[in-house]
Amino acid sequence: MKFGSVDDPGNLNLSLPQDHPDTYKVLESNKQGQLEGIYVGCAKWNKKDLKGFYPRGTKDELTYYAQQFNSIELNATHYKIYGEDVISGWREKSGDNFKFFPKVVNSISHFKRLKGVEALVEEYTLPIRAFEEKLGMIFLQLRDDFKPKDFDRVERFLEIWPKDLPLAIELRHTDWYNDETVATRTYQLFEEHNVSNIITDTAGRRDLLHMRLTTPDAFIRYVGANHETDYSRLDEWVDRLKIWKDHGLRNLYFFVHQNVEKESPLLSAYFIEKLNKALGTDLDLPNKDPEPPKLDL
């Protein structure tokens, strides 16, 4: 993912900011007080983008991917509405504990910009239900130029969104965060509708690190820079997530992107290993060394 990419991340301060104080109130609202699930994955499963990840002779990329990771940030659903047959096929190819996190189709978010989308929401969500128990959380990404002047569109969208389908939202325009009144109003709206506030960590857009959860579920889109700082940034995330866990984090959804996506699985494996040690979890580590090509003798 190129969003927020910079030429030389080594010259930037990429440390995490302090948490928003209301984040702890939200975490502590988790009455169970326990971590229910951790899902870590990449944003794509095709061989072209994840070159070198699949052993030679892999017949089905999704089946292999789902053996290595327990989740996928499903960006394919952003570009078209797939039928129930396709989605059911994806569901059947994945493991029992696998989760899909589909992105809302761009006809809703980018072309219509949330205006007059009642019929489209129904058209999009009907086949998405075919994921059944393997549906994680749907996420809505709004355009970089979608500004707070259209706050009422977000309100209306949340009113028509099916309440039984978990939703997260990524707001990219900086005015959603640099105006305290707007930010507070937005966070309150998300809390009222049980919508998770996506945190995007990318080198060139540190303003998106608002560190303000609106549900006890953290949905984080991490964008590496194919640079050595990617690892120290992940180390800091592990430390922060340990704190959040101690305060009541319910679910973690963490998706790793890279400017050059083929390195995403390796970076994800590093993160999972560190997370297991810090949180005492036992997520399976993806295979970092696929089988070498077989030589014809």
Image (cartoon, rainbow, N blue to C red):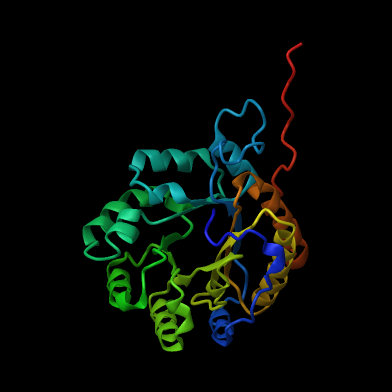
| Rendered view: 32 above or below 257 | below
| Residue 194 position in % (x across, y down) | 42, 74
Quadrant of the rendering where the C terminus is positioned? top right
Occupied quadrant, residue 144:
bottom left
| Residue 106 position in % (x across, y down) | 35, 55
| Residue 169 position in % (x across, y down) | 43, 67
- Residues 287 and 234: in front is 234
| Rendered view: 24 above or below 253 | below
| Rendered view: 248 above or below 135 | below
Q: So how many labels did they put on this image? A: 0
The answer to whether residue 281 is seen in the rendering is: no
| Residue 255 position in % (x across, y down) | 58, 57
- Residues 285 and 198: in front is 198
The answer to whether residue 223 is seen in the rendering is: yes
| Rendered view: 178 above or below 85 | below
Q: Is residue 279 left or right of residue 207?
A: right
Query: Which residue is at 31% across, 66% downward?
Result: 161
Occupied quadrant, residue 168:
bottom left
